[in-house]
Amino acid sequence: MATEPPAETTEEPGSGCTDDLAFDVFARDCPSRDALKHVTDRWGSLTLDALLDETFRFNELRRRVEGVSEKMLAQTLHALERDGLVHREAQQTNPPRVDYALTPLGDQVARQLRMLIDLVEDRMPQVLQARERYDARHAAR
Amino acid sequence: MATEPPAETTEEPGSGCTDDLAFDVFARDCPSRDALKHVTDRWGSLTLDALLDETFRFNELRRRVEGVSEKMLAQTLHALERDGLVHREAQQTNPPRVDYALTPLGDQVARQLRMLIDLVEDRMPQVLQARERYDARHAAR
């Protein structure tokens, strides 16, 4: 009866990625695809971007990220904490309070994300013009 | 009976955004939030990143973006075309073929997105270590 081998460390990309030497978001089972999703999905991206400026308590963050439900924000924070991007700090106060902040890794990722958000916000006049042209073209058919 | 006023141009952010002078993804109804979503959602981000390297036909793109369904890829391409990021070029050949390519605006956005993807892929060893620590901590409870 062979004993279970020790769990492999997951620091190498492994078989889910296109090759064993590099993480690749194009590969369906590569864990980088999930990590990118946590960073870029609707609530993950806004949460990271909000935390780039300051530390927030849960309800403060919920107000900042307009429209997020309590459940979705909790899920988002768990995923970002598990990926090592957000740090959850329970303060020993009465009543207890919990602060959320970026880790150094989260700060790096959030800074890169902020550049993308800035670009999209900056180019919105072009995007809206494109939408008008597209809709006019398709309404005319 | 007053006639309808002409439709307002949508080049100004308008009331959906936090103020009338700037687009703001944190505002629930600001159109920049949707545009960011199209750029960063699971299939939008991979589609833009794939097109950064080359022009693709629909089925080529579907193979490149592993796991995307025909329906989701079609929806993704429509949204990106409507936002002015992807150009759809129907070739006058027999049989007809359709190529998808980035517009100059799409190229700018995709380049910024690529930097974020590169960073996430590069930091995956740290992310996986964080996941292991998180899971061990929570399994121990």
Image (spheres, coloured by chain):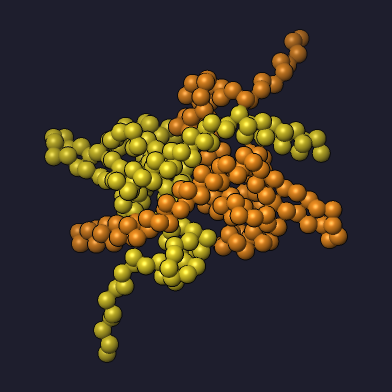
Chain colours: A yellow, B orange
Q: Residue furthest bottom?
A: A1
Residue at 56% over, 52% down:
B49
Q: Is residue A134 left or right of residue A55?
A: right
- Please count the marks in the image: 0
- Of A42 and B122, the residue lying toward us: B122
Q: Is residue B20 above or below residue A58?
A: above
Q: Residue furthest top?
A: B1
Residue at 36% over, 45% down:
A108
Q: Is residue B116 visible?
A: yes
Q: Position of residue A28 (x, y in %)?
A: 51, 63
* Quarter-of-image position of residue B96: bottom right
Q: Position of residue A73 (x, y in %)?
A: 37, 42
Q: Is residue B72 visible?
A: no
Which of the image's four quarters has the N terminus of chain B?
top right
Q: Position of residue A129 (x, y in %)?
A: 67, 31
Q: Position of residue B60 (x, y in %)?
A: 67, 62
Q: Is residue B107 left or right of residue A18?
A: right
Q: Is residue B46 above or below residue B104?
A: below
Q: Is residue B82 left or right of residue A34?
A: right
Q: Is residue B115 above or below residue A135?
A: below
Residue at 61% over, 55% down:
B53
Which of the image's four quarters has the C terminus of chain B?
bottom left
Residue at 28% over, 40% down:
A101
Q: Is residue B2 above or below residue A20?
A: above
- Of A111 and B84, the residue lying toward us: A111
